[in-house]
Image (cartoon, helix red, strand yellow):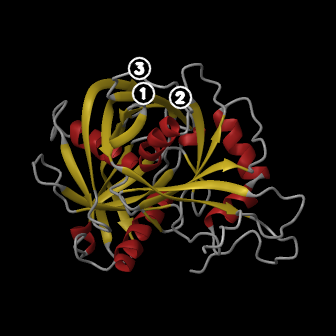
Amino acid sequence: MERPLAVPRLPPHGPGTPALSVVDMHTGGEPLRIVLAGCPEVAGPTLLAKRRYMRQHLDHLRRRLLFEPRGHRDMYGAVLVPSELPDAHLGVLFLHNEGYSSMCGHAVLALGRFALDFGLVPAPPAGAREARVNIHCPCGLVAAFVECEHGRSRGPVRFHSVPAFALATDLLVDVPGYGKMAVDIAYGGAFYAFVSAEKLGLDVCSAKTRDLVAAASTVTEAVKAQFKINHPESEDLSFLYGTILTDGKDTYSEEPTTNICVFADEQVDRSPTGSGVTARIALQYHKGLLELNQTRAFKSSATGSVFTGKAVREAKCGDFKAVIVEVSGQAHYTGTASFIVEDDDPLRDGFLLK
């Protein structure tokens, strides 16, 4: 006779520290840990104010969620918060190993599915094949379009970006160990430096990840030291998030172009990078290498996963000519968890090895 299953319960933990309940997903291999419950109220009248509040007062939760022993240095997270925008279904703060980003495309693709499946948006009409989810990111309002069947998500998700633009092209940067080279900087909800890996003596498709990370990080630090990043509408968005090394194939082709994104504290994106694809599309459109509604495929050199992107219409961001970019990719659920803290655990807030 089979014994009945025990009712799941939490192990002993600090009575004053609520368990953090999460849903884990990945998009093209890049993880996303979404907080369901256990996070204290994140105060602030605007989403950017909430981002500052969490950095100043709740950063231990970021470390608990993402760092070892509950996570790893390349884990990524999302905390859902109310939005002040009337059209938004939800607001989100993005978490990584160094802090808080302004945009995350792979997370938006996953959150589109999550919002529909967990009832954060009204159920789509009977027979609808797609549901719209308006997600307020720190960079602005982003619309995700979720394929659905009988009110549940299925298949890929696509999103329309905030206005994306080229900030600087062929910027001459002195990169230690490599000399002066031309670097492009573009914005897709976050600012990235773009350079062909070949200029750094590497093949983005076959080089060891640690070599790509070291080279990309050197470029990032050189750009930060030699070029001031300014967003035309917000100082909170005026920072270089990372460097994307490419295969140099910027001219339109039906074949995928490969890249790898190294952001924050040498964190490696396993996906093609949704905000990076957005910025790269804006850059290619700015250079006349891509037309409106001309779809390109972007492949991650880390996992081989693919996103597609296209510029769907022209826009403005301050005085910059910009485009709205549509990015499409597939997110999957991987599990759920409840994380607890024992008060006498000296490593309760996590740690990273480097």
Residue placed furthest toward the front: 1
Q: Which mark is residue 121?
A: 2
Instruction: Tell me the amino acid under the disc marked 3.
Output: Pro
What element does badge 1 sit on?
strand
Q: Is residue 336 above or below residue 94?
A: below
Residue bearing mark 3: 125
Mark 3, other Cα within 10 Å: few <14 / some 14–19 / many ≥20: few
Which comes sooner in the sequence, label 1 or label 2? Answer: 2
User: Who comes first in sequence, dot 3 or dot 1?
Assistant: 3
Assess whether mark 2 and mark 1 are in contact (beta carbons under 8 angstroms): yes
Can you give x and y, in whole percent of width and height, for residue 198 in the image? 21, 69
Using the rendered image of the protein, determine whether residue 165 is visible from the camera's viewpoint: yes
In what element is the residue under mark 2?
A: loop
**What residue is rendered at 40% in x and 39% in y?**
153
State which quadrant residue 219 falls in.
bottom left
In terms of secondary structure, where does tag 3 sit?
A: loop
**Quarter containing the C terminus:** bottom right
Pick whichever, 241 or 136, lies toward us: 136
Question: Which residue matches tag 1?
Answer: 132
- Is residue 178 rendered to the left or right of residue 265? left
Q: Given this view, does label 3 or label 2 mark the residue nearer the observer?
A: 3
Q: What residue type is labelled 2?
A: Val
The amino acid type of the residue labelled 1 equals: Arg
